[in-house]
Amino acid sequence: MRTYTQEEKQAVIDRVISGEASARILADTGIPKSTFYSWLRIYREEQNAANRRTVDIRNFHLLENKVARLEDIVEILKSATCTPKSPLKQRLYAAEQLYGK
């Protein structure tokens, strides 16, 4: 089994990014299909991780609003007079009391 350098891997990924067909890249390079798709999966996971870490001011405000809304929901649920394991009648009564909050 051949070991590929990081430069070779990056060159293949760059070809994918440029829009070249995977079948053509595989035919040109002779890289096993499973190896190619493994590199591609790793690349996409790294890109997704990088995108998750990127926070701009708009996303920050959206997250702030979401946290505030969830905190309000938690406070409403804390005021419920029953637990999830309470009898159905008691849960329905509690739901009626919470309706509209």
Image (cartoon, helix red, strand yellow):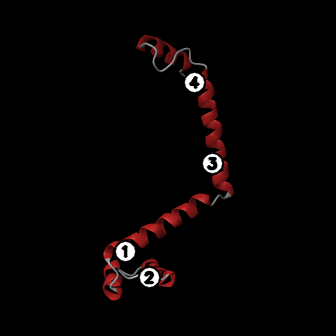
- Furthest toward the bottom, the residue is 28
Disc 4 and disc 3: Cα gap in Å?
A: 23 Å
Q: Nearer the viewer, mark 1 or mark 4?
A: 1
Circles 1 and 2: CB distance less than 8 Å? yes
Disc 4 and disc 2: Cα gap in Å?
A: 55 Å
Tell me the element at label 1: helix
Disc 1 and disc 4: Cα gap in Å?
A: 50 Å
Q: In this image, 26 relative to 15: left or right?
A: left
User: At which x and y percent is residue 72?
Assistant: 63, 31
* Amino acid found under the numbered disc labelled 3: Leu
Q: Earlier in the sequence, mark 1 or mark 2?
A: 2
Residue 30 position by quadrant: bottom left
Task: Tell me the residue that label 2 is attached to.
Answer: 4
Q: Earlier in the sequence, mark 4 or mark 2?
A: 2
Relative height, residue 101 to residue 9 (above, below): above
Few, some or many C-alpha atoms within 10 Å of disc 4 (few <14, some 14-19, many ≥20)? some
Tell me the element at label 2: loop
User: At which x and y percent is residue 79?
Assistant: 61, 19
Quadrant in which the C terminus is drawn: top right
Task: Tell me the residue that label 4 is attached to.
Answer: 77
Quadrant in which the N terminus is drawn: bottom left
Residue 39 position by quadrant: bottom left
Disc 2 and disc 3: Cα gap in Å?
A: 43 Å
* Amino acid found under the numbered disc labelled 2: Tyr
Circles 4 and 3: CB distance less than 8 Å? no
Q: Is residue 89 visible?
A: yes
Circles 1 and 4: CB distance less than 8 Å? no
Tell me the element at label 3: helix
Q: Earlier in the sequence, mark 2 or mark 3?
A: 2
Residue 80 position by quadrant: top right
